[in-house]
């Protein structure tokens, strides 16, 4: 139950931060990507804030005996670049540029502008389902 409450609180805080930072507005995200037009630096400040917080957090992880709510940390163990990773990152970036949303802001936008965000979220879920279907067929 504690994990569920912590997850809900973390997700709520994350969504509120995205909304307050304007990241649920696709025009703002596209404005950031339009470096030769009417460039909007807002997203750079949001990303910079996130990087600073995570850089500080990563300094504390090795010194901690363990996480508060689960048995162990789940840290990445791989650092290699695979064609699947590069292709997925490229597809993510293309979708982000076209839609102006990525998963976190898309879900947060469901509260602010449900009709427009629902189209994105449904397409995202369909894409996730297609990947699972094709990965399952290849195994």
Image: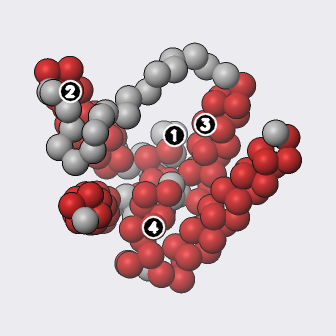
Q: Disc 3 or disc 2, which is closer to the eye?
A: 2
Residue 15 versus residue 43 in the image, above or below:
below
Q: Quadrant of residue 67?
A: top left
Q: Which mark is residue 72?
A: none
Placement of the N terminus among the 4 image quadrants: bottom left
Give the residue at x 48% y 64%.
106
Q: Can you identify the residue that label 4 sits on?
A: 107
Q: Can you identify the residue that label 1 sits on?
A: 36
Mark 1–mark 2 CB contact (< 8 Å): no
CA distance separating discs 1 and 2: 40 Å
Q: Quadrant of residue 50?
A: top left
Q: Can you identify the residue that label 2 sits on?
A: 61
Give the residue at x 45% y 67%.
107
Q: Quadrant of residue 86?
A: top right
Give the residue at x 43% y 47%.
32
Mark 1–mark 3 CB contact (< 8 Å): no
Give neighbour class at mark 3: few <14, some 14-19, many 20+ (Cα, 10 Å).
Answer: few
Name the outermost residue toward the top. Answer: 80
CA distance separating discs 1 and 4: 29 Å
CA distance separating discs 4 and 3: 19 Å
Q: Disc 2 or disc 4, which is closer to the eye?
A: 2
Q: Which mark is residue 89?
A: 3
């Amino acid at each position: 139950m504690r994990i569920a409450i912590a997850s809900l609180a973390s997700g709520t805080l994350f969504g509120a931060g995205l909304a307050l930072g304007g990241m649920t507005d696709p025009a703002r995200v596209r404005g950031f990507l339009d470096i030769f037009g009417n460039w909007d630096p807002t997203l750079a400040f949001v990303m910079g804030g996130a990087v600073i917080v995570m850089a500080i957090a990563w300094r504390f992880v090795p010194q901690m005996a363990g996480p508060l709510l689960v048995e162990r940390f789940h840290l990445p163990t791989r650092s290699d670049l695979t064609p699947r990773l590069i292709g997925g990152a490229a597809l993510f970036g293309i979708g982000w540029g076209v839609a102006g949303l990525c998963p976190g802001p898309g879900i947060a936008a469901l509260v602010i502008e449900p009709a427009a965000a629902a189209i994105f979220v449904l397409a995202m879920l369909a894409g996730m389902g297609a990947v699972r279907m094709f990965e399952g067929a290849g195994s």
